[in-house]
Image (cartoon, rainbow, N blue to C red):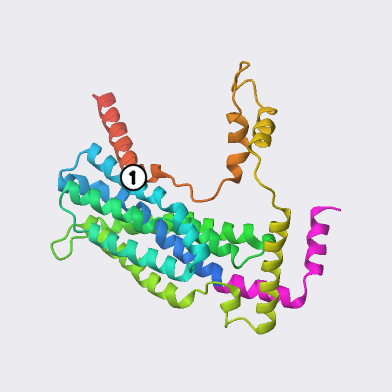
Amino acid sequence: MNSHGSAALGRAKLSDVGQRARRRVAYRLLPFVFLLYIVNYIDRVNVSFANLRMSADLGLSDRVYGLGVGMFYITYVLFEIPGAVIVERWSARKWIARIMISWGIVTILTGFVHTATQFYAARFFLGAAESSFFPGMIVYLTHWFCARDRSRAIACLYAANPAAALIGSPLAGWLLGVHWQSLAGWRWLFILEGIPAVVVGAVTYFYMTDRPVQAHWLPDDERDWLVKELEGEVQAKKQDSKPYDFGSFWRRTNSKIDPCIFPGPHRSSWNHLLDTDLREAPFGIVHPDCDFAPTDTRSDGNRRYAHQRLALR
C-alpha cells in the first residue's frame, strides 16, 4: 500500500470526535506557540544587531563581546535538562511564563549596561532565564499531540525561526537609528524587544493549559478522547521499553563504520554516531554563530569596499 493509501486508512480509523479534537487543539495551541518562539528568537539574537553600535559606545573589544556572548551559553546549556524536567513534572504553563517574564526583564536591563562586567552579568543571567524554553516547548507539545501529529506541531514551532528573522532584522535596523530620551538606539533595541516577552509571558500564564485533562475549553467527548489516546501511547511505550544496553549499541555502531572517515583497525564508531544517532538527539541545539552574523557581515562589507578602493588607485 502506498503512502497516500496508508494516510487515508489512518484518517478513516479516526473517529469524528478525534478529528475535531486534533483540529481544535492545533488551532488553539500552534499559533500561540509560534508567537512565543518568534519573541524568543528575536530576543536571543538582538545582541548581534546591538553590537553594531554597542561595542563602540562602551569601548568594548571584540574579545570582551565574544566572552559576553559565551557567558550566555554557560547557563543556557547548564539548565536545559533540569528545566525540561520541571515542565514534565510540574507545570509547563507556569515555567514557560516564568522563563519569558524573567528573560524579558533581563533583556530590558541589558539596555542600561555601561561596563564590560555589567555586560557579562546581563548575558550570564539572560542565559539562566531563557534556558529550557525550547526543550520545554517540545515537552509541552508531547502533552497535547499524539505521535501521528507531533512532527507537524514541532515543524510549526521551527517555522517561527525564519519568521522571526524576517521581523527582527528590519526592526533592529530601524531601532539602531533612533535616539530617544538621550538613549542610543542599541539601548532601545534591548528595551523595546524585551517588553513583548514580559507581556506575552503574563498572557502565557492565563492562556496555556498544562494538560488535556485540565482543558475546560475542550468539549467533554474530545477531551476524553485525547486523554485516552495520549495515555495509551504512554502505556505502549512502557510495555515496549527495555533497559538500555550500551554493549549492543557499541556493537551496532562498530559494525557500520565508514573506513574512509575512520581508517585503521582501531577506528571508532563516531562516523555512524554522527550519521544516525545525532539525528535522533533531543531538540534545542543552539546556533551561536547568529550572535556574530551582523558584525561579520559589516566587516566583510568594509573589507570588500577597501579592496575596491585599493583596486581603483
Q: What x and y, as percent, mark residue 250?
A: 64, 32
Using the image as rendered, state which of residue 76 and residue 181 is in the foreground. Answer: 76
Prevalent SS, magenta region: helix
The residue that mark 1 highlights is 294
Residue 137 appears anywhere in the view: yes
Q: Nearer the viewer, residue 236 or 30?
A: 236
**Which residue is the extreme one toward the top?**
264
Residue appearing at x 35%, y 46% in the figure: 74
Which residue is situated farthest in the left direction here? Answer: 182
Which residue is depicted at the point 18% across and 60% down?
179
Task: Tell me where residue 272 sits by quadrant.
Answer: top right
Residue 163 visible from this viewpoint: no
Image location (x, y in percent) of residue 49? 30, 50
Answer above or below: position of 53 versus 306.
below
Residue most extreme to the right: 1
Q: Position of residue 190 (x, y in %)?
A: 27, 59
Q: Residue at x 41, y 69 (%)?
A: 97
The quarter of the displayed image where residue 61 is located: top left
Q: Which residues are magenta?
A: 1-28
Q: Amino acid at mark 1?
A: Pro
Q: Nearer the viewer, residue 260 or 296?
A: 260
The answer to whether 45 appears left or right of 20 in the picture is left
The stretch drawn in magenta includes residue 112 = no
